[in-house]
Amino acid sequence: MKFTSVVMRRWLVYVFATSMFAASCNPAEPVDTLRPQSATTITEVDEVIAVIGDSEVTLGDLVDQIGGQLGLMDFQYRSQRHQVIETAMKQFVRTKLLESEAQSRGITVDVLVAEVLGDKVSVSDDDVHFFYIQNQAQLGDRTFESLAPQIRAYLENEIRDPVLEEFAQGLVEDHDVNYVLSPFRVNIDTTDSPMFGNVEAPITLIEFSDFECPYCQSFIATLEQIKAEYPNEVKIIFKQFPLNDIHPNAQKAAEASLCAHEQGKFWEAHDLYFAEQDRLEVANLEEKAERLGLDTLAFSACLESGEYADVISADVSQGTAVGVNGTPAIFINGRPLRGGAVPFEMAAEMIDDELKRQKR
């Protein structure tokens, strides 16, 4: 059996679990989840929760203290709930289709599964031991004997599940199965955020980004291909998410981009900042403003005043409330596209799915 780095990574997920955004910049410490949210994101803000003498304390009074935390908890609950339902739905449909197919062949489901798998599932003792040796550094002091059954089951499932899934997918197509359950989506306010593309485009791609993040820089290639392949179907919205703990110039670069936006040059600044990512100190930003043909006096005054700091803070709060913990974080029509700086093909798959859904 061939062991790939992908299989090994999946094993580590199987044992330990990973974060939401893989190829992304992440702060050394978790992003603060207690940033204030708008009171409109919290239900029952007028609910009285305490009384001090003659004064009532409502949930709305606590928005600044716990608003962001409640928003994040709500996101996590809804996301996990949807995932449980979606997984159970697909498993249920697969079971029913396998039962129907077995019945049509006059055999049991176990016999059908055995026929489908054939000799494809083959994990030897050497395979199990090799996998343990390859991952021993990550497994700590766990002994081979204690982990061998888990490793064997995992490796067998790594072979078994895709084979059955491929067979079941054929049955899904043959039986004209239609999954009516809508994908999990979040609501993100894009009012006044920089936008590129056709304002009437049916697909909205939202990117939470950091100008000092190298993964955000690499994601530009994907964005450019999306622009070329979907010129009228996709509009791109940029949301600020500077990771100040690890990127010292990200905050001012974010503010500078909005100062440029004020003069109608956001995307020009966006491209230049990422192209010269190693030169984003204030003096560099002011020099770039001159090259971009901005009113440099107005730009410098804007940057020095920090007038867009609150806008950036609001973007970060909003991102945190929908599960963003690294950059780039991508949402397509409100659907999280997990993986950080994903290749074009992954983004295109979700875009195409959204376009198909709108034609149903």
Image (cartoon, rainbow, N blue to C red):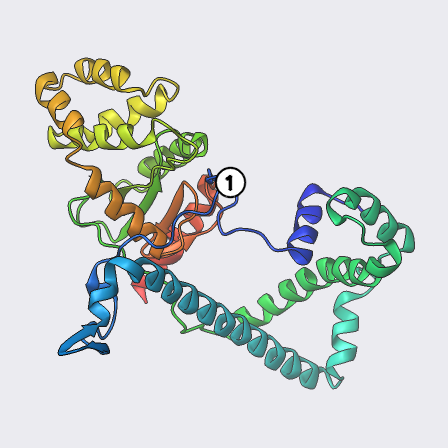
Image location of residue 146, percent across then percent down: 84, 60
Disc 1 secondary structure class: loop
Q: Nearer the viewer, residue 103 or 273?
A: 273
Residue pictured at 13% horizontal, 79% vertical: 54
Q: Is 172 situated above or below 346?
A: below
Q: Nearer the viewer, residue 353 or 277?
A: 277
Q: Is 206 situated above or below 122?
A: above
Q: Is residue 295 left or right of residue 19?
A: left
Q: Nearer the viewer, residue 154 or 147?
A: 147
Q: Amino acid at mark 1?
A: Ala
Image location of residue 337, percent across then percent down: 43, 51
Can I make out residue 187 in this image?
no
- For label 1, the crowd category at 10 Å Cα-Cα, with few meaning under 14, some 14 to 19 and many 20 or more, is some
Can I make out residue 217 in this image?
yes
Q: Where on the picture, by quarter, is residue 107?
A: bottom right
Image location of residue 357, percent across then percent down: 35, 63
Q: Is residue 294 left or right of residue 170?
A: left
Image location of residue 316, percent across then percent down: 31, 46
